[in-house]
Amino acid sequence: MKIKLEKKLKIELEILGACIYYPSLFDLAKRILTQKDFSSENSKIFSIICELDECEQLSSELIIDYFKNSEFDIGDLISIGSKQVENEFLFEQKLKRFLDLKFSIVAENKLIANLEKIKASEQGLDLLIELRNEIDSLIETNGRFQKEKNFFECLPDIISEIELERNGKSESLNSLRFPSFNRCTKGLLPGNLCTVAGAWKNGKTTFGLNVILDISFNENVPIGIFSLEMNKKEIARKLLGMYVGVDYEKLRNPKSLIDSDVSKLKQNAIKEFVDSKIYINNKLLNNENEIRAITKNWVKNYGVKIILVDYIGLIKTSQKGKSLENRERELSFISQFLKHMATELNIPIISLAQLNRQGLTNPSTENLAESIGIARDSDFIFTIYKPLTTSSKINITVDGKGIPIKENHFVVKLSDSRHTKSGDHFLLELDKCGLFREITSNIK
């Protein structure tokens, strides 16, 4: 460790010296490093050079003149800088070595500091997850050293991607049983955050499960489900009921099952789910960072392509009690976190959100419980509701003929979209086992 610290300090001085002696290299250093990357007095020197750069045209003479009248003696840095080579490529390599050393030292210190704590604690696994989150964050910070391509350099990749999508090799994920959902989204793409909002007992969880499972079966992709409202046993039995044709209420109370129900379970369960790759987590999560850590593990080790979060209002945040003052701001932070996570891990996320009591009769995004920020951060936001409970009049037609509204009918509306036209409605019918089927998209 001592040798690493000495090497880091040596390169740190070389970087500062080069920036003072060859200010043209400072732009590169400023894009990659921050004041926090340097130790003690050196961080203050770097900060002062940043301030000078913002105020005036930076030059070696300007920097040296400023420090003559300051408390800092930069004589050694000037001497070190004079021995450096004014070569951007070599300077980039020096910056990379500096960040690698810094990461190695910080990560090693964290591991040493937490090792005994993890051994002694009954919550060793939770501490390991927290430690892994910290190490992951360090790795990401270390990965900021990248040479960026300009738009022209990216054009071949962009055009190739468009051609692949034109020929049916798109990364978008589509549902088979809900064509109107596909029409509204044009397929969910990596980085998309799609929110389904509904009032209490208005089908949002059931619809969310229907959509993600249908995408999994249709696209043959692994999926992940975070159930913060139902436990793992309930989710498992709900999925079984939907696809083997047994009433979920009976599965919750197996004593009510009859012989034919048991036969369906035995005959159909394996057949329906044999090719599925469904990962369910309902562990009590301490904060949003654990969702990220688990999802990252799913994506890396199991190839998960999309996740469902049920529901956003139950996610705890690590920011509570720090900079966030109320629940609305807390939920806004969580919705931003989910959008950022979708982008970072390159997967679409379906999140479920609650509408308030007014949402029973007026199911719109203005009645999102706790935070309107959820609508702002979502690429697509759908509302789901029972047309019999809403105050608005809806005419439902199939092939030009009106159909009566039933208790098991649900309307799904694309309330807002960043990428497509919003306002479309489609009608679903729910069977007693919890499986939706689309009836029509012709609703006014």
Image: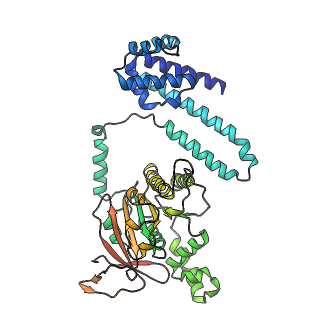
| Closer-to-camera residue (414/441) | 414
Q: Residue at x 58, y 43 (%)?
A: 134
Q: How many marks?
A: 0
Q: Is residue 8 above or below residue 395?
A: above
Residue 246 in picture, x, y percent from top left: 53, 83
Is 224 on the left-hand or right-hand side of 110? Answer: left
Residue 49 in picture, x, y percent from top left: 44, 22
Residue at the outermost front position: 325
Is 149 on the left-hand or right-hand side of 432? Answer: left
Please state, as top left, top right, bottom left or bottom right, where the N terminus lies in the image: top right
| Closer-to-camera residue (219/4) | 4
Is 302 on the left-hand or right-hand side of 385? Answer: right
Residue 293 in picture, x, y percent from top left: 56, 51
Question: Could one spot residue 369 in this view of the protein?
Answer: yes
Q: Is residue 171 above or below residue 398?
A: above
Q: Is residue 204 above or below residue 192?
A: below
Please state, as top left, top right, bottom left or bottom right, where the C terminus lies in the image: bottom left
- The colour style of the image is rainbow
Q: Residue at x 51, y 54 (%)?
A: 299
Residue at the outermost left position: 400
Is 284 on the left-hand or right-hand side of 211? Answer: right
Residue 321 in picture, x, y percent from top left: 57, 51
Residue 92 occupies which quadrant of the picture?
A: top left
| Closer-to-camera residue (391/422) | 391
Question: Could one spot residue 224 in this view of the protein?
Answer: no
Residue at the outermost right position: 120
